[in-house]
Image: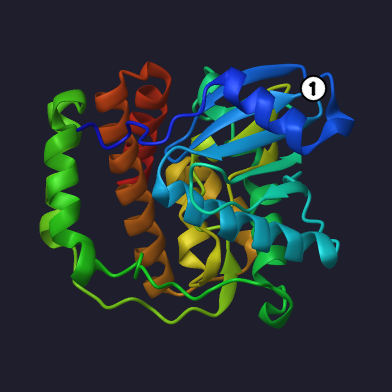
């Protein structure tokens, strides 16, 4: 079975009926398909709201996490320079078949829809500033769990990383693939570092929104948790060219060598996962961004 295939698909008509029944104030519901993520089917409603329906059980868990974290950010009126979804509607059913959530619409295009895979270079300092403010939030005010998945443990994930790379290899140019294997061969094995800050946890081009070719919003907070800053700092190695990274870290603040290693690992891992996704789905836009991101991650 394709790992990205929905086990609980919700059609646009089914979504419209559910929303109109639960929220009569939104009638007549004008609904538009915004596509699918790894775990959710996404619809725009009345050009104002985004409703997310779990495509599989993992999506249900992510939906609950996202709603809790975004509600926490809304309560403390977090402002970091980029827009993020505000939770408004929440249907908690028995399982992924009848649960969904509605957020405010973050206007713009998903980053992978843009042609320029270097477009975040000019926003390097702004991204660094956003993450500095996010990571400075008092975690006592945030309803988020610790990193139960050990996302940054190479001791746990290195073998899996090799497997993902092999699956993605048909869409990776040979020279880049050999560079990735060399990186993996030399990758040290370490345990998951202690979590100390709120992290988005899944920063990559499919979760970034741009308007007018410039980064404007950050969506899909379903992997947010109390973790190590490197989980988010990986964006500097995924989407920012090496010559612009100094601007990013000047805005964020200095980090130690261990954090740099962790961030680079997360960047390379995420881009390889995206390449496997692109191979499985035939998504050429994600493929183009993930190849560019993998090159940046290894340089």
Residue that protrudes farthest toward the right in the picture: 25
Q: Is residue 213 left or right of residue 232?
A: right
**Which residue occupies the foreground of this view, 252 or 201?**
201
Seen in the picture, residue 110 relative to 74 is either above or below; the reply is above
Number of numbered markers: 1
The spot of residue 119 in percent (x, y) is 58, 29
Q: Quadrant of residue 26?
A: top right
Q: Is residue 248 above or below residue 216?
A: below
Q: Nearer the viewer, residue 285 or 244?
A: 285
Q: Secondary structure at mark 1?
A: loop
Q: Position of residue 23 (x, y in %)?
A: 80, 36
| Residue hosting label 1 | 47
- Whether residue 222 is visible to the viewer of this picture, yes or no, is no
Is 213 located above or below residue 56 in the figure? above
Q: As rendered, which of 17 and 128 lies closer to the eye? A: 17
For the point 32% across and 37% down, which residue is it? 295
């Amino acid at each position: 079975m394709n790992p990205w295939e929905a086990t609980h698909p919700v059609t646009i008509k089914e979504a419209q009926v559910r929303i109109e029944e639960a929220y009569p104030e939104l009638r007549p519901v004008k609904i538009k398909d915004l596509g699918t993520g790894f775990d959710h089917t996404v619809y725009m409603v009345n050009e104002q709201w985004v409703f997310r329906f779990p495509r599989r059980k993992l999506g249900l868990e992510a939906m609950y996490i996202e709603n809790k974290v975004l509600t926490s950010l809304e309560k403390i009126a977090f402002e970091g320079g980029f827009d993020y979804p505000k939770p408004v509607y929440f249907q908690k059913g028995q399982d992924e078949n009848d649960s969904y959530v509605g957020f405010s619409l973050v206007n713009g295009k998903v980053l992978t829809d843009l042609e320029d895979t270097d477009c975040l270079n000019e926003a390097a300092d702004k991204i660094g500033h956003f993450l500095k403010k996010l990571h400075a939030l008092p975690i006592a005010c945030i309803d988020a769990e610790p990193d139960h998945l050990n996302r940054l443990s190479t001791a746990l994930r290195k073998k899996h990383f090799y497997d993902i790379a092999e699956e993605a290899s048909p869409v990776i140019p040979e020279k880049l693939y050999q560079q990735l294997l060399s990186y993996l061969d030399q990758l040290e094995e370490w345990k998951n570092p202690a979590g100390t800050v709120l992290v988005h946890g899944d920063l990559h081009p499919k979760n970034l929104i741009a308007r007018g070719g410039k980064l404007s919003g950050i969506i899909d907070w379903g992997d947010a948790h109390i973790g190590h800053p490197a989980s988010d700092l990986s964006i500097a190695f995924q989407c920012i060219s090496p010559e612009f990274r100094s601007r990013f870290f000047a805005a964020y603040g200095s980090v130690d060598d261990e954090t740099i290693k962790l961030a680079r690992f997360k960047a390379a891992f995420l881009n390889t996962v995206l390449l496997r996704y692109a191979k499985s789905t035939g998504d050429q836009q994600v493929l183009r961004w993930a190849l560019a991101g993998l090159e940046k991650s290894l340089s």
